[in-house]
Image (spheres, coloured by chain):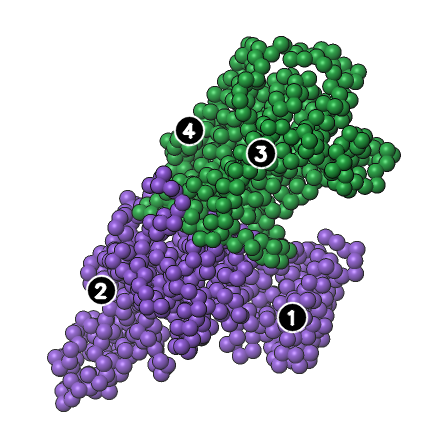
Amino acid sequence: MSTKTPNEQDILRPIGIDKISKPYLALFGVASLAFGIFLIGWFYQLWVGMSVTGLSDWGTGGGVTWGLYIGAFIWWVGIAHGGIILSAAVRLLGMDRYMPVARLAEMLTLAGLSAAGFYIIVHMGRPDRMVTSVIGHYHITVNNSPLVWDVTVITAYFVLTATYLGLTLRYDVTRMRDQLPDLFEPIYKIMTIGYSEKEDKVIERMVWWVALAIIIMAPLLLHGGVIPWLFALLPTYPGWFGAIQGPQFLTIALTSAISGVILVSYAFRRAYDWDHIITDDIFRGLLLWLGFFCLLFLWLQLQQLTAGSFSATIDHQAATASKLSHPAYIVPMLMVVGVLAYIFATTLRPSLFNKKRAIGAAVLVLIATLVEKTYFVVAGLWYPAFDIYSATPGEYFPSLIELSSVLGTIGMVTLFFLVISKLVPVVELHAIEHLRGDHGHGEHEHEEPAESATDSEVKA
Amino acid sequence: MSTDDESFHPLGSEWEDELETMLDDTEYDTELGMQMAQDAFRVSKGELSEAEFHEKYHDDVMEEFGEDERPTKEAYQKMQAEASEEGTVSRMLSKFEGDGEESRRDAMKKMGAGAAAVGLGAWGTVDDGPEEPPQPSAGDTAAQADEDEDDGVQWGMAIDLDRCDGCLTCVSGCASENQLDSGVNWMYVLQYDDPSATGEGSELARPAGAAANRLVRPCQHCTDAPCEKVCPTTARHTRDKDGLVLTDYDVCIGCRYCQVACPYGVNYFQWDEPDVPADAIKEHYEEEGMGDHMTDDRGRWVDSRAPRGVMSKCTMCPTRQDGQMGEGQVGTTACEEACPTGAIQFGDMNDPESDPQKYEDNPARGRTLWRVNPPSADELEEDLDGVDDDLESVLEATDLEEDELTLIKAVDIVSDGLYDGDEELHSHDLDYHERNFREALDALADHGLDHDSEEVLVGLGLADETDEDEEFDGPDERDAQMELEAFTGSPDSNFRLLEEYDTNPNVIYMGQQPGPNAEQTEPTGTGARYEQLSYDTVTDGEIQIVDNRKDVLDEDTVGGGLFS
């Protein structure tokens, strides 16, 4: 698109309220509306009770007790992995190629975790007791309850990521302070409190260690650990139980995370003409990674289908048979297969790649993972080991309030980006320095874009 | 394990402090407890002998607890000899038991939970010999404590599925007592088809013939309850004094993980505002002088229907067990009380003399007790006035059939004695029926019919005739048992639900065990259908019993008509 050199002005472009444009306002309005509608729904739920959802009790209750709220919770935690994977790639593995989107990805982590945390609250019958009941008995429950492990790890993960982001922002904010809007002066002051250039080296090392901590924690403890353990540790649900859920959840997290980063990066590139910063090259790379994780995702699904069909126990067979016949499982699988096929094709014939298709792939994967995860939660409860309640089968279709929660949290995350991009640079200064420095970026394989992005709206 | 602090306990000083706090909370001497615990570890290390340990604390223990039957030096030798089959811990603990009435769990409470927990780990390793260093972990000590606690009260049920008519009175009895919303079937009865069911043994259990395959499903009150394990708040907990698994309605956050973790599907979330207000329930029961039917003796809200947003399930009536509804109601549940066939036997699973244990030991005996209704002593006396005292005359003069008398006597023969106390009993108590049997037999004996004589027993087919030179050796217990089984059958199997998952449920079933292919049929229940039943609320309303709760909840679901 262009070979112009990235500079500080580029990354400062979104910052400040005077930079607010009409499309920005429009997106802000749409996101607020989505979030607002869900908030109204949620307040109604608090007012009337959780009977406003499509949930019921499993057993004689003829329903399922966990549904879309939990599915979407898992989905958001999965998306939150994006920041970590990219940051790790950049900071620990030296994959500088992705430096321009690393911070966006980290922000996506915070936003994703916030959405997930919000889902926990929304899912509860008595959210007002979260503090007294959970924290008050923490020292006892942390020994046994996977749900408490979840809350612990998510909190730790959030704190680490926020620290990490906060530390790296100090560098940027200090250096670009003069060009940042005075209106937010107090915020910048707090962010850079006690800063001196001597700390750069220290911070760099700290950030490296924090990144290491996060990268160890994310796959091993979060989406490869406590989140799947909510289900995988319960032997009485054949659809859930077993060691494969850890790896399986992790692949789901990684596919949706990369898709999330693709969407957010694309939205910023389009909005602020950052073609020379968030280059096509980045999208190609992300897409390849997406393909790789889609492959792993499908491979692990195949393992489950095979083991569950060949000579499984009666309850396990029933759970597997459902997968093979339920659209909420089959359709997402086909979507991921389609995405994988497309990504393979682009490696054989590079001209098949374009950003629109990359966006399409990302959206398909996000829909597929959300539907699959929700199906996973619900179907687990449909096919318990004690599968005797045939007269009261677990019917479930999410209510409008539950459905609106998905749009609502997407709106919430969008608002997060809209707001934060007005405050601080969403592309790090290091990335700019790196791009225009002598880091051997001579071999840019920029193809002239076959088409300029013509699609109207891109939702984060 | 940290050993660098000055604690005597392998888990370190922090753990020790925690124990000390636990001891402080008891009415007993903290210092003594900690000192004993410390020395218990010395015993485990071989620095102190058990006898010395006992000697050292005998006076203190007497002073503190008023009893100490642990051996002193003199008794130690003897104790050692007896010890071979029992573990050291339980042996030593059992010596605290005083008059034998007290459970080991109570004894442990006396020692102070902390001292017990600290001490047990150490004691537990003594038997393994001093060469093994003591390595109790928190888990070990807890597990050890659990094992040794199993003599306390553990409420539970024995349910005779072959005797279930599917009348659903247990379901409505429970709903009424707890004022449950439509569809909240804490107690549930379902009928199912099962290709692997044999149906053997069920034909004789009821006068009406073979019952359909049914499952009566209250909460199983598992000793190792998965629901409790996963609870992020401790709202779902096991009540220490009697093993009931309850939900503290004031603590639950409504995450529903307990419902997910429970393999049996017995949990019911309170999705909306319950139909009957808490105040009304309180008022109603208080007027009856039965407490509020919500708060148990510990002051925790665990009984009656749940408030909005928290989880509920069958409670096995804790306020009854606390005596709040009258002493006569202790050891009963609403469902048991409602059951007309005696299919539900509630009681202490750790007491071999409790209804469920006695019933399970010999179901044919239990069934016969329920099925045969002997004439009352007064009736017999009246009928027998002026009648000869031979068997034939007695049978002729009274309403007693020979078969009936045979069964009554057979029950007497296979029993270690029939209840002869004078407590107030209800018809759902096994003792009530035993008493009727005994009174009938006594009335006959008073009249002069010696039902232990060879003549009568042989006449009833309950003993073999002896030759002239043989001495009559009393009734034949095997014949008696066969008579009972010929009359009312014996259950096909005896099982606990999903035992393989190690939940240790406290409900024992007798009858057909549902196989992995068992599928509920519709209409389920029964005899009666759920939709035909209702109960009157304490607010003078009427609540419909409903099989599928989703039908009720769907009314509130915000679907905008899209999904209907």
Q: Nearer the viewer, mark 2 or mark 3?
A: 3
Regarding residue B503, the answer to whether it shows in the image is no
Q: Mark 1 points at which residue?
A: B25
- Could you tell me which chain the residue with mark 2 belongs to? B
Q: Name the residue under label 4.
A: A330
10 Å neighbourhood of mark 2: few (<14), some, or many (≥20)?
many
Q: Which mark is residue A28?
A: 3
Q: Is mark 3 on a helix, strand or loop?
A: helix
Using the image as rendered, state which of residue B388 and residue A236 is in the foreground. A236
Which amino acid lies under the numbered mark 1 shown in the image of this protein? Asp
Q: Is mark 2 on a helix, strand or loop?
A: helix
Q: Share a chain, discs 2 and 1?
A: yes
**How far across and how far down the image is residue A264, in percent?**
60, 28
Which amino acid lies under the numbered mark 3 shown in the image of this protein? Phe
10 Å neighbourhood of mark 1: few (<14), some, or many (≥20)?
some
- Label whose residue precedes the other's in the sequence (2 or 1): 1
Measuring 83% from the left and 38% from the top, which residue is drawn there? A195
Measuring 46% from the left and 60% from the top, which residue is drawn there? B307
Q: Nearer the viewer, mark 4 or mark 1?
A: 4
Measured Cα–Cα span from mark 3 to mark 1 = 57 Å
**How far across and how far down the image is residue B9, in percent?**
72, 60
10 Å neighbourhood of mark 3: few (<14), some, or many (≥20)?
some
